[in-house]
């Protein structure tokens, strides 16, 4: 699947030093502008450092012609690969497709909606090349642009995700990041199908650093993450990353059992020692509802983990590629 040494017409094998992976889902409207910006920033940096780079656009089943548009973008100094998936597989799958097709040893992830400023590319390269960091990731400087409810949800999500975890996933980290060759190799070696790249790239260790940034407003369209979709991603991240929900469930069960034991003993004392007649009906109903509700909740939770296990066991491919295009920069322009 991986095209680390893609053979290109002319017989030479070219491996760029850095692949910039950009997932696209219905981003046609802003793509030409984004591409011009990205190419200019990347090409300038490539020249300054004597490196070769490529852009890998992964079209995640867009319905607005993003794939065709990407394949016809002008080559502005650096190679362009366009990997068009057979349908919408989701951002994490698109990132994995990009990682698999990236010919570069080092990899950068970047959103294609213009929210991740290409002006940060020199910073990322400095941290990787000059300061020897393996993972440099952008972190939102502030979330004041987002609704309070969303902020609350995100905060709670990370609290739960990092509960008792050995490697905490940094809160507010973006997918905008650079991975050194060994960090990218570490990610490529992961066998699991349910990926949550933000989590995985912190889990691998090595030298990591956060870079504060201010996301630009989306130039066109709207975010593709509805609340439900975000909830789905959170569930996937949680269940593939953390046993915390199971532990919380177990802890809750233990507390309930403890309370029941205490209450049970209390009733026995009331009846036998003090001889108080027992008005039982309401307490039974409340007890049943608490236990029943908790059991259903925990069963649903376990079901999520089982679903995760099932999808790992089925070992299906994470994505299918419908089209793959490589547009090379002129050899002299690329510095070869
Ligand atoms: N994206 C994708 N597949 C999807 C949803 C989104 O490849 O199913 C891409 C999208 O084109 C963009 C990036 O993932 O480049 C981030 O998406 P978006 O801007 O909607 O997310 P947000 O910035 O709101 O987190
Ligand atoms: Mg965005």
Image (tube, helix red, strand yellow):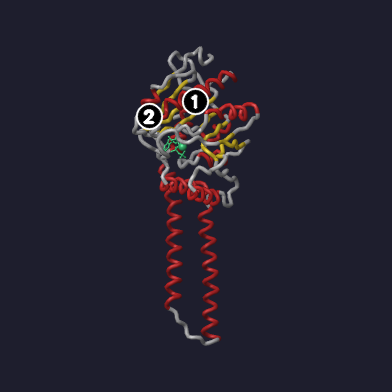
Q: Earlier in the sequence, mark 2 or mark 1?
A: 1
Would you call the spot at circle 1 few (<14 residues within 10 Å), some (14-19), or many (20 or more)?
many
Q: In the rendered image, which quarter is residue 207 located in?
A: top right
Q: Position of residue 180 (x, y in %)?
A: 58, 30
Q: Secondary structure at mark 2?
A: helix
Within 8 Å: ligand 1 and the Cβ of disc 1? Answer: no
Classify 132 as above or below 334.
below
Q: Position of residue 88 (x, y in %)?
A: 37, 37
Q: How many marks can you see?
A: 2
Q: Position of residue 74 (x, y in %)?
A: 42, 19
Q: Residue at x 50, y 42 (%)?
A: 145
Would you call the spot at circle 2 few (<14 residues within 10 Å), some (14-19), or many (20 or more)?
many
Q: Residue furthest bottom?
A: 275
Nearer the observer, 336 or 171: 171
* Residue 174 appears anywhere in the view: yes
CA gap between label 2 and label 1 equals 16 Å
Which residue is the site of mark 2?
66
Q: In the rendered image, which quarter is residue 281 located in?
A: bottom left
Q: Secondary structure at mark 1?
A: helix
Nearer the observer, 115 or 68: 115
Q: Residue at x 53, y 58 (%)?
A: 248
* Residue 313 appears anywhere in the view: no
Q: In the rendered image, which quarter is residue 17 located in?
A: top right
Q: Is residue 250 left or right of residue 296?
A: right
Q: Are the residues at dot 2 and dot 1 in contact (C-beta closer than 8 Å)?
A: no
- Image quarter in which the N terminus is found: top left
Which residue is the site of mark 1?
38
Q: Residue at x 45, y 75 (%)?
A: 283
Q: Position of residue 304 (x, y in %)?
A: 44, 52
Classify 169 as above or below 220.
below
Residue 22 is labelled as: none
């Amino acid at each position: 699947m991986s095209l680390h040494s893609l053979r290109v017409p002319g017989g030479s094998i070219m491996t760029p030093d850095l692949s910039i992976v950009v997932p696209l889902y219905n981003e046609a409207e802003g793509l030409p502008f984004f591409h011009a910006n990205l190419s200019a920033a990347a090409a300038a940096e490539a020249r300054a450092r004597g490196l070769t780079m490529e852009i890998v656009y992964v079209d995640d089943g867009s319905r607005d012609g993003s794939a065709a548009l990407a394949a016809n973008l002008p080559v502005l100094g650096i190679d362009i690969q366009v990997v068009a998936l057979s349908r919408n597989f989701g951002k994490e799958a698109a990132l994995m497709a990009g990682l698999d097709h990236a010919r570069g040893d080092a990899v950068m992830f970047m959103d294609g909606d213009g929210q991740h400023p290409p002006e940060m590319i020199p910073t990322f390269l400095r941290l990787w090349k000059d300061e020897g960091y393996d993972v440099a990731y952008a972190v939102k400087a502030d979330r004041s642009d987002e609704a309070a409810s969303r902020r609350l949800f995100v905060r709670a999500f990370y609290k739960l995700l990092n509960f008792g975890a050995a490697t905490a996933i940094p809160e507010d980290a973006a997918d905008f990041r650079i991975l050194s060759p060994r960090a990218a190799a570490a990610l490529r070696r992961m066998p699991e199908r349910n990926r949550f790249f933000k989590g995985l790239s912190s889990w691998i260790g090595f030298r990591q650093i956060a870079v504060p940034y201010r996301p630009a407003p989306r130039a066109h369209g709207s975010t593709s993450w509805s609340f439900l979709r975000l909830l789905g991603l959170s569930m996937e991240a949680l269940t593939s990353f953390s046993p915390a929900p199971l532990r919380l469930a177990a802890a809750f069960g233990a507390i309930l059992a403890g309370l029941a034991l205490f209450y049970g003993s209390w009733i026995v004392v009331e009846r036998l020692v003090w001889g108080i007649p027992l008005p039982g009906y309401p307490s039974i109903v409340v007890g049943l509802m608490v236990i029943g509700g908790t059991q259903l909740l925990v069963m649903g939770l376990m079901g999520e983990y089982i679903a995760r296990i099932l999808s790992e066991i089925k070992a299906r491919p994470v994505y299918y590629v419908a089209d793959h295009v490589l547009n090379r920069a002129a050899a002299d322009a690329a510095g070869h």
